[in-house]
Amino acid sequence: MIASFRAENLKTRKRWANWILIGILLAWILLLTYLTLFLVVTLSPKSIQGPVPASVLKRRLFPENFVPTVLGASASIGAAIMLIFGALSTASEFGWLTVQTILIQKPTRATVLGGKLLALAAATLLVSVLMFAAAAVASYAAVTLDGSSSAWPSGEVMLQAFGALLLQLAVWTAFGAFLGIAFRSAAAAIGGGLTYLFVGEALLGSLLRNTPVVKEVLKFLPGINGGAINGAFPVTIRDTAASTQLVSAGRGVVTLLVYLVVFTVFSLLIFQRRDVGGS
C-alpha cells in the first residue's frame, strides 16, 4: 500500500485542479470572509444596519473569534471544495481510463483504493492546516490594522477546533470520493454532491428546519451534525443569526465518524465488485 500511496500522492500534487481548489478556498477565507468585511466596517460603518453595530461586529474578525470563523467556512465553501477534491480524485481515473492500467499491475483493488484514500487523508490534513493558518494570520492582521487588542483562544480550544475542522473536511472528501466511484463520472459526482449540499441540506435545514418530520431527518445529516460541532465554538459577540442546534456536539462527532467509516467501506465494496471496463 505504501507504493500505491506514493503514486497517488504524486498524482495529487501534480494535478493542477487540486491546487486551484485550494487557492479558491484560501482566497475565500482571506478576501471574502476577512478583507471584505473589514473594509466595510472600517470605511463604511454606517452602511451596516442591524442590532450589532459595526464597532462590535468587527470583533468577529479578531483572534478571539477566528475559530468559529474558520469552522463556519468549513461548513460551506470548505465542504464544497473538499467534495469536489474527493470526486476528482476517484472519478477522473474512470474518465481517463487509467483505472484499467492501474489494476493490471501488481496491487490489488483494496491496495489501490487504500493508497488513494491515504493520499486524500494527507491532502485533507494539509488543507485543514492551511485554512487554520490563513484564518489565524488574517485575524492577527485585522486586529493589528485596527489598533485594538484581542485574546487568542486557549491551546486546548484551538486543538479541539482543529480536530473538528479536520473531521468535517475528511467526511466531505470521503463523500466526494464515494460519489466518484459510484458514478464513475466527475461531472455526475460533483453535480450530485453539490446539489445535495446546497439544495438538499441547505434547503431543508433553513426552510423546513422546524417541520416535525423533516426535523427528525435533519438530525442524521452530516451537514447538520457538523453545524452542531461548530456550535460548540460560539463567537464572543451577540449573534442574532445563530440558529438552535438540533443535536449535541458529542452526537455530531459520533455521527460524522460513522459517516466517514460508511463512505470508506462503501467505496471499497463498490470498487472491488464493480466492473471497471466501461462507464
Image (tube, rainbow, N blue to C red):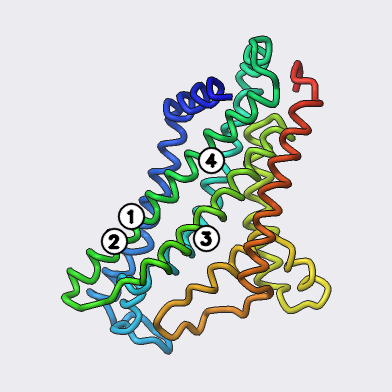
Q: Give me the residue at 73% from left, 79% from top.
A: 210
Label 2–label 1 contact, CB within 8 A: yes
> Residue flagged by tag 3: what amino acid is it?
Ala
Residue that mark 3 sits on:
164
Q: Which residue is mark 4?
A: 121
In space, the residues marked 3 and 1 are separated at their CA atoms by 17 Å
- Relative placement, left or right, of 252 versus 143 is right
Of the residues under marks 2 and 4, which one precedes in the sequence?
4
Q: Amino acid under label 4?
A: Ala
SS for callout 2 = helix
User: Which mark, by number, is residue 134?
Assistant: 1
Q: Position of residue 64 (x, y in %)?
A: 34, 74
Return the disc, 2 or 3, that comes first in the chain's sequence: 2
Q: Residues within 10 Å of mark 1 (few under 14, many from 20)?
A: some
Give the CA separation, mark 1 to mark 4. Answer: 20 Å
Q: Quadrant of the N terminus?
A: top right
Callouts 1 and 4 close, C-beta under 8 Å = no
- Residue 264: quadrant of the picture: top right
Q: Which residue: 59% across, 35% down?
A: 117
How many residues crowd around disc 4 within 10 Å: few (fewer than 14), some, or many (20 or more)? Answer: some
Element type at mark 3: helix
Q: CA distance from mark 2 to mark 1?
A: 6 Å
Q: Residue 67 appears at what percent x and percent y?
A: 41, 67
Q: Nearer the viewer, mark 1 or mark 4?
A: 4
Classify mark 4: helix, strand or loop. helix
